[in-house]
Structure formats: C-alpha cells, structure tokens
Amino acid sequence: MTRALVNVPKTARAGDIVEIRAMIAHPMETGYRQGPNGAMIPRNIIRRFVCTYDGAEVFAADFHPAVSANPYLAFSTRATTSGTLTFAWTDDAGLTHTASAEIVVT
Amino acid sequence: MRRLRFSVAGGLLAAVACGMAGAAEIAPQDRRSGADFMSAESRAMQAEDAANPGMLWVLDGERLWQAPAGAAAKSCADCHGAAQTSMRGVATRYPAFDARANRPVDLAGRINLCRTGQQNATALALDGQDLLALTAYVAHPSRGLPVTPEADARLVPFRENGRRLFERRMGQLDLACASCHDDNWRGRLGGSPITQGQPNGYPLYRLEWQALGSLQRRMRNCMVGVRAEPYELGAPEYIDLELYLMSRAAGLPLETPAVRP
C-alpha cells in the first residue's frame, strides 16, 4: 500500500514556475545493516522517481542506499496547461507506487 | 579504562552539580517546547504538512480510523464520527483516569481499551506502527491547542509518583531526568542543546529514528543514555512520568506530529 504525500498548487497562471513536493513512506533499507539475528537485512530502496506532467516527464531522480527513509523531494516546473501530474516511485522489487494531483492553469 | 570513564562521567556530573542550586521546576513563563531548540530547517519541516514525515502516519491513522475492526465490525468512525471535530482537544488532556483500570491511561492505552472493550478486537502492539499511526491521527486535531492537564483528584497520587521518578537519580551515571531537563536546560551536551524534556509533540518523527516514535520510546532512550535499565514496554511508571511531564508542560501548544532531530 502506498502512503505518499504530494503537494501541487491547485491553480497557477500559464508560465508560472510552481513548486512541487513529494514524499513517500518507505524504509529505504540500505542492505548494509544486520538484523537482531546477525543476518543481513536485504536491501529495499526506491530506485527511481519520475514525475510526469500531462504525459511528459518533467523531473526524475535516481536514488541510492544513502538516502534516508521516507524520502522527500521538492522541485519546480513551469505551469503550461491544466492537467494531471503523476508521481511514480519504483523500488528494488520493480514495484511502482504512484500518486497524482491535478493543476488548473489559467 | 577506569580513568576514561571517570573523566567522561565526571565532566557531566560537574556540569550538573553547577546547576544543582536551582533544582526547581521550570516556571510557567520559562516553559519552552523542544521545537524552540531546533534549527530553522527542522522547524520548517515540522510546520509544513507536505514536508513533515509524521503526516505519513497521520494519513495511515485516518485509514485505520475508518476501517471496521474486531468481532463487533465497528470502526472508530462509527462511534466517534469525524476525528477532526470529535477528537479536537482530547490529546491535550491525556493521560486521563480510567475507572475500570483504576489508574491513568495514555492516549495509546485509551485507543487499545476502545479496541478491546468496544470493538471486541485484539489490542494493537505497543509502539507498533498501527498504534502509533492511530495515536498520531487522534492527537492531530489538537495541534496548536494548549496542554491542559485534567484536574481529576484521582490523578494526583500518580502524578506525584511521576514527579518522584523524574527527580530520582538512576543508572551508572546517577542522573535524574531533572538533573538535565530542570536544572541544565539552558546548557548543551555533546554539542546538542539540552531541552526541557517537554512531551507536547508525541508521537513525533525523530530524524535519528527515521520513523515516528512514542514518548515511551524517547524515555527509554534517555534511560539507556544514563545507563539505567529502562522500565518494561507499557510499564505503569511511563504513564506516571507522562502525567507529570504533561502537568509540567501545561500551556505549551500541542505539536503532534512534531519533528525532532
């Protein structure tokens, strides 16, 4: 189950630069830690984050084991047309967690 | 080795001894939330819902609030409605006296009593993710409201026990909670500010934990820090301490889910 918080301005004027924030609940287990029984805890991290705006990719990031749990990203894009921003986090198992938000551009 | 240990502990005790003259409770006008001791960046992280990782647990708590549970197949919402209104102010009054248990219970304990008594469900694991999420969700509508401990006379002996435990020296370093959090809160320890040990933001997201944690977890941390044996998980001593801490925090705004370094 995905627990994610995304923050996109509800409205913007065409040409405005808008700030977008996205956070997902994820342990970001590094794979370098031992559990209580001495066995290594298998790595489980988000590998890649992609944000698309109206179908076009506007921001992407590769994650590595040093990123802390519940990673938070803030970035900006230029408001062009009213549409949907979709957020996708892909983890080590290849599973993709998604969230989306609407923006109205006037 | 022996020499080293003495130098570390000795330095700490010397710092503590200097402040011993003022061994008294913090005056109401001097009470300061732990947030006041944080960096501007951490304060901004707490203030902004989109950046506060504790909100992920609040989000999860909302799901649990709506989900039917137990043999009664009732959800929290079936009786209590919308938490935004029905739970507003509740967290500022806890721990509160429970007549059936004949002792005070904290907010997490209250939720578990509701689960076993009303929903016929099993109690949630103490300090487990679900109980933390529900507690954060129930406390969240009280954010910004002042801590207002109950005046219930039945709470007095438990609160007094809490004060006794707070002022009792413990562990190999022989320090009481009060040695740092009453007497030396203006100082620093190992580069970090010593705070007043105020409980007004729990459950909170600690950056060091990379997770939401309870006040009991924080108290266990402190006890391990002074090399004392922590009380068992769910021990009544924690509730008594929390009662005293909340009376000591009266008037401070509730910050759940707070962020702390």
Image (cartoon, coloured by chain):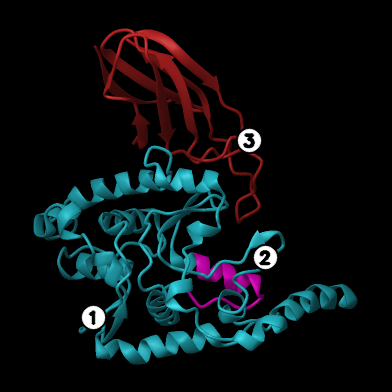
Chain colours: A red, B cyan
Which residues fall within the magenta stretch? B218-233
Q: Which residue is drawn at 51% across and 78% down?
A: B231
* Whether residue A60 is situated above or below residue B78 in the rendered picture: above
Name the image quarter holding residue B177: bottom right
Task: Give yes or no for contact between labels 3 and 2 (Cβ–Cβ under 8 Å).
Answer: no
* Chain letter of disc 3 in the image: A
The type of residue carrying mark 3 is Ala
Name the image quarter holding residue B20: bottom right
Q: Mark 3 points at which residue?
A: A66
Q: Which of A65 and A95 is in front in this view?
A: A65
User: Which quadrant is home to the N terminus of chain B?
Assistant: bottom right
Q: How far apart are marks 2 and 1 (CA)?
A: 39 Å
Q: Earlier in the sequence, mark 2 or mark 1?
A: 1
Q: Mark 1 points at which residue?
A: B98
| Residue B166 percent coordinates (x, y) | 51, 83
Q: Name the residue under label 2.
A: B188
Element carrying mark 3: loop
- Residue B152 visible in the current orientation: yes
| Residue B9 percent coordinates (x, y) | 77, 76
- The answer to whether tags 3 and 2 share a subunit is no
The type of residue carrying mark 1 is Asp
Q: Residue at x 18, y 71 (%)?
A: B117
Q: Residue at x 71, y 84 (%)?
A: B17
| Residue A25 percent coordinates (x, y) | 42, 39
Q: Which residue is drawn at 37% across and 42% down?
A: B49
Element carrying mark 1: strand
- The answer to whether tags 3 and 1 share a subunit is no
* Whether residue A101 is situated above or below residue A3 in the rendered picture: above
Element carrying mark 2: strand
Left or right of B16? Residue B207 is left
